[in-house]
Image (cartoon, grey):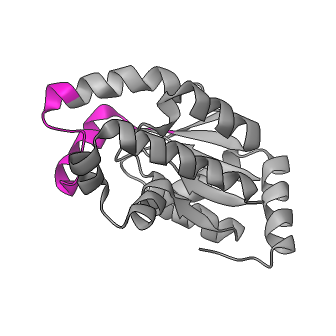
């Protein structure tokens, strides 16, 4: 079983995703990291040199390459789940989990990171958040992200919310694959 983590930038998909993958003994992949590795440049550089349409094309291609994975936790980019074909793909091959965090928390995290290619000012960021939220809500499961929890605590809470059948499928796949982690 593949678990695709979706949500706005700064919601903790990568950090919590690593914790979750470790706890269920499956590989972890970050879609943005896979894109950067494939392109041999940062997301910011890809946007600057080739533009957003090129980035979205590569994102779509690399997302599709996860189809062959038997079990994994995959953190998607903030915009991945806002395209109908990506939503359909993810829902056809795995389970989508929306990391729902309050905008104030996201904004704080985005401000401290400083390498987010689509964010120039607060109004623009808030509009993007408001536009994307309706897509994120199409996820199979919504996990409320709270500021007072560590990534490990969030991963543990997510484990309690996942259906037993999903966890069993992930563990069975990991066992067959020899428990490999990325």
Picture layout, residue 10 above or below residue 28 = above
Q: Is residue 87 shown left or right of residue 54?
A: right
The answer to if 101 sits in the magenta stretch is yes
Residue 9 in the image: x percent, y percent?
Answer: 35, 44
Q: Quadrant of the C terminus?
A: bottom right
Residue at point 15%, 31% (across, down): 122
Q: Which residues are magenta?
A: 99-124
Residue 137 in the image: x percent, y percent?
Answer: 54, 25
**Residue 173 in view in this figure:** yes
Residue 13 in the image: x percent, y percent?
Answer: 47, 52
Q: Is residue 107 shown left or right of residue 134?
A: left
Residue at point 64%, 35% (across, down): 141
Residue at point 51%, 24% (across, down): 135
Q: Is residue 95 shown left or right of residue 74?
A: right
The answer to if 19 sits in the magenta stretch is no
Picture layout, residue 8 above or below residue 49 = above
In the foreground, 7 or 80: 80
In the foreground, 79 or 58: 58
In the foreground, 170 or 62: 62
Please tell me in which quadrant of the rendered image residue 89 appears: top right
Residue at point 83%, 64% (across, down): 173
Residue 178 in the image: x percent, y percent?
Answer: 80, 79
In the foreground, 62 or 100: 62
Q: How many marks?
A: 0
Please tell me in which quadrant of the rendered image residue 43 appears: bottom left
């Amino acid at each position: 079983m593949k678990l695709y983590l979706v949500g706005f930038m700064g919601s903790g998909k990568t950090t919590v995703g690593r914790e979750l993958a470790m706890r269920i003994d499956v590989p972890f992949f970050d879609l943005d990291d896979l894109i950067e590795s494939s392109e041999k440049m940062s997301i910011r550089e890809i946007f600057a040199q080739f533009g957003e349409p090129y980035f979205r094309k590569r994102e779509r291609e690399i997302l599709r390459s996860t189809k062959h994975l038997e079990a994994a936790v995959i953190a998607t980019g903030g915009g991945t789940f806002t395209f109908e074909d990506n939503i359909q793909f993810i829902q056809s091959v795995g389970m989508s989990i929306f990391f729902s965090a309050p905008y104030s928390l996201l904004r704080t995290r985005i401000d401290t990171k400083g390498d987010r290619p689509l964010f120039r000012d607060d109004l623009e960021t808030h509009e993007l958040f408001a536009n994307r939220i309706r897509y994120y809500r199409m996820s199979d499961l919504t996990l409320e992200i709270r500021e007072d929890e560590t990534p490990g605590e969030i991963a543990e809470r997510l484990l309690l919310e996942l259906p037993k059948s999903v966890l069993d499928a992930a563990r069975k796949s990991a066992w067959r694959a020899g428990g490999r982690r990325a």
